[in-house]
Image (cartoon, rainbow, N blue to C red):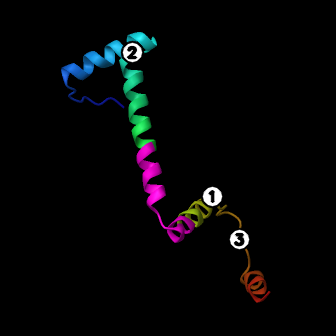
Amino acid sequence: MRKNIDIDDSLVLKLKVFSAFENTTVKKRMEEAVEYYIAMKEKERMDALTPEEKEDLGLLMLMQQANLDSTVSREKVMKELDK
């Protein structure tokens, strides 16, 4: 996806110099910076969750991985619940 954004000229100059020293492109440096920022924000959100919210999120993730094609009969479910 191509997006145009306005970046301060002094920042572009710094990105060019930094990219030249690292032997990479400015685009690659910017992509890495955005990926790092997103990862840090995700980590902050996870750290801010309560233990109960973390359990709920884990359950949601497991439910999303479930195979929806396989089914279990009502009797089998009730039998397992009775144990």
Q: Give, as a three-letter code, the residue at label 2.
A: Ser
Name the disc covering residue 65, or none: 1
In this view, 1 is above or below 59: above
Q: Residue at x 54, y 68 (%)?
A: 51
Give the residues in magenta: 40-56
Query: Is 52 left or right of 21, judged from the image as shown?
Result: right
Q: Main secondary structure of the magenta part?
A: helix
Q: Residue at x 41, y 47 (%)?
A: 41
Q: Where is the N terminus found, in terms of image quarters? A: top left
Question: How far from the left and from the top, in percent, is residue 44?
Answer: 43, 52
Q: Residue at x 36, y 18 (%)?
A: 26
- Of residue 80 and residue 51, the one placed in the foreground of this image is 51
Name the disc covering residue 71, or none: 3
The quarter holding residue 75 reads bottom right
Identify the mark nearer the N-term, 2 or 1: 2
Q: Which residue is mark 2?
A: 19
Q: Give, as a three-letter code, the residue at label 1.
A: Gln
Callout 1 secondary element: helix
The quarter holding residue 60 reads bottom right
The quarter holding residue 65 reads bottom right
Query: Is 13 left or right of 39, judged from the image as shown?
Result: left
Q: Are marks 1 and 3 in contact (CB under 8 Å)?
A: no
Residue depth check, mark 1 versus mark 3: number of the one nearer the observer: 1
Callout 3 secondary element: loop
Callout 2 secondary element: helix
Separation of disc 1 and disc 3 at Cα? Answer: 14 Å
The answer to if 69 sits in the magenta stretch is no
Q: Residue at x 21, y 20 (%)?
A: 10
Q: Give, as a three-letter code, the residue at label 3.
A: Thr
Question: How far from the left and from the top, in percent, is residue 40?
Answer: 43, 44
Separation of disc 2 and disc 1 at Cα? Answer: 40 Å
Q: Residue furthest bottom?
A: 82
